[in-house]
């Protein structure tokens, strides 16, 4: 069935943790891939999935750093993946496909914000190239391996409110570079990608979700900020300590990973997809001019914009999704 952006009765909320959400769920025999699964909410996502019995493949640019962070676990594997490098994405996907494994959960978690204009080897703006196009290509390459009933979960952000996808100048070739607008554009793209992917995957039982994890002091979004900026943005209190206030969108990392886990495993979402979630629930649709730090804006859930982005992404990456067998 089609799903509207209307919250449902969920037993979890803003303060729930990943382990609370997954408690009692057995993922034995399931295979999951988590991009950036060795740091931040990605690491908490990896821990929750692996503790529930899933085999988790952590995709990371630096495998040594990933091994040090993840530690030793019989059901966690480390693989090299650089989302800004198309050749690295292809190589990662080919290694997975050669093992003839089914993929049950793909968690498109990795992302970053760049405060200076950077470009990849193709000339594409780095945030859009990494946060969106990298995951678009990865999902396309892994598409044949996704099992019936698989879920693809893409981490977006309430930061999508900072920028729509500018189809006339995606790569900041004419407009002045603004880090927050670029980040917002990439996060809007994440939500639109999840929306259209669900339409493609639905006939094969593959469902897709996007989400806002919650504001966190150790997230990639805040790492490049000065202490003064972190205080001004509410990440730090007056004494320089991290602010934890789930009701006001400020979470610990384990709380931040909870909605990713909820989207990946909750039976409440059976038969649903193409939706943007937050606080372990479906997010409300809010007006474009909303000042709330929650909810999904119209440009991040528009079917017309989702299709337009999909066609642009195919052109920019050279990737087309085959019919799923």
Image (cartoon, rainbow, N blue to C red):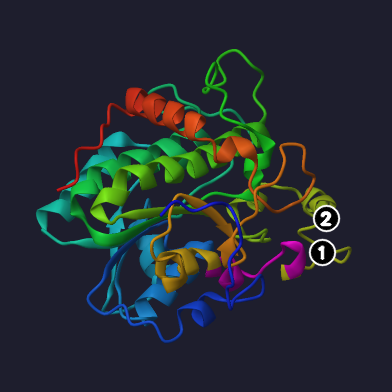
* Residue occupying image coordinates x 19% and y 46%: 324
* Left or right: residue 254 compared with residue 23: right
| Residue at (72% x, 41% y) in the render | 287
Say which element carries label 2: helix
- Identified at 58% across, 34% down, the residue is 185
Instruction: Name the image quarter holding the N terminus.
Output: bottom left
* Residue 274, x across and y down, in percent: 45, 49
Q: Are marks 1 and 2 in contact (CB under 8 Å)?
A: yes
| Residue that extends furthest to the bottom in the rendered view of this protein | 24
Cα–Cα span, label 1 and label 2: 7 Å
Using a 10 Å C-alpha cutoff, classify the residue at mark 2 as few (fewer than 14 neighbours), some (14 to 19) or many (20 or more). some
- Of residues 76 and 290, the one drawn nearer to the viewer in this rendering: 290
Q: At which x and y percent is residue 162? A: 68, 37
The residue labelled by disc 2 is: 231
Q: Which residue is mark 1?
A: 240
For residue 122, the mark is none
Magenta segment boundaries in residue numbering: 247-258
The quarter holding residue 65 reads bottom left
């Amino acid at each position: 069935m089609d799903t509207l952006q209307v919250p449902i009765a969920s037993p979890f909320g803003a303060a729930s943790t990943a382990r609370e959400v997954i408690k009692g769920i057995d993922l034995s025999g399931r295979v999951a891939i988590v991009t950036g699964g060795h740091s931040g909410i990605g690491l908490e996502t990896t821990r929750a999935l692996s503790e529930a019995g899933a085999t988790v493949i952590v995709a990371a640019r630096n495998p040594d750093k990933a091994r040090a962070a993840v530690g030793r676990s019989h059901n966690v594997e480390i693989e090299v993946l650089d989302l800004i490098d198309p050749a690295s994405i292809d190589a990662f996907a080919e290694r997975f496909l050669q093992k003839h494994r089914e993929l049950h959960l793909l968690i498109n978690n990795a992302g970053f914000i760049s405060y200076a204009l950077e470009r990849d080897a193709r000339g594409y703006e780095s945030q859009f190239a990494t946060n969106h196009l990298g995951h678009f290509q990865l999902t396309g390459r892994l598409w044949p391996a996704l099992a019936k009933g698989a879920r693809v979960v893409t981490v977006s952000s309430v930061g999508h409110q900072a920028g729509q996808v500018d189809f006339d100048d995606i790569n900041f070739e004419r407009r002045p570079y603004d880090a927050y607008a670029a980040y917002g554009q990439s996060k809007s793209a994440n939500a639109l990608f999840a929306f259209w992917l669900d339409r493609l995957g639905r006939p094969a039982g593959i469902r897709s979700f996007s989400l806002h994890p919650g504001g966190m002091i150790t997230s990639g979004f805040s790492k490049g900020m000065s202490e003064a900026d972190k205080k001004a943005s509410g990440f730090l209190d007056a004494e320089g300590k991290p602010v934890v206030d789930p009701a006001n969108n400020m979470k610990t990392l384990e709380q931040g990973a909870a909605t990713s886990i909820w989207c990946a495993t909750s039976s409440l979402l059976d038969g649903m997809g193409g939706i943007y979630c937050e606080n372990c629930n479906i997010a409300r649709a809010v007006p474009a001019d909303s000042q709330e730090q929650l909810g999904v804006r119209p440009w991040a859930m528009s079917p017309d914009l989702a299709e337009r982005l999909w066609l642009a992404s195919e052109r920019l990456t050279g990737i087309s999704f085959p019919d799923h067998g």
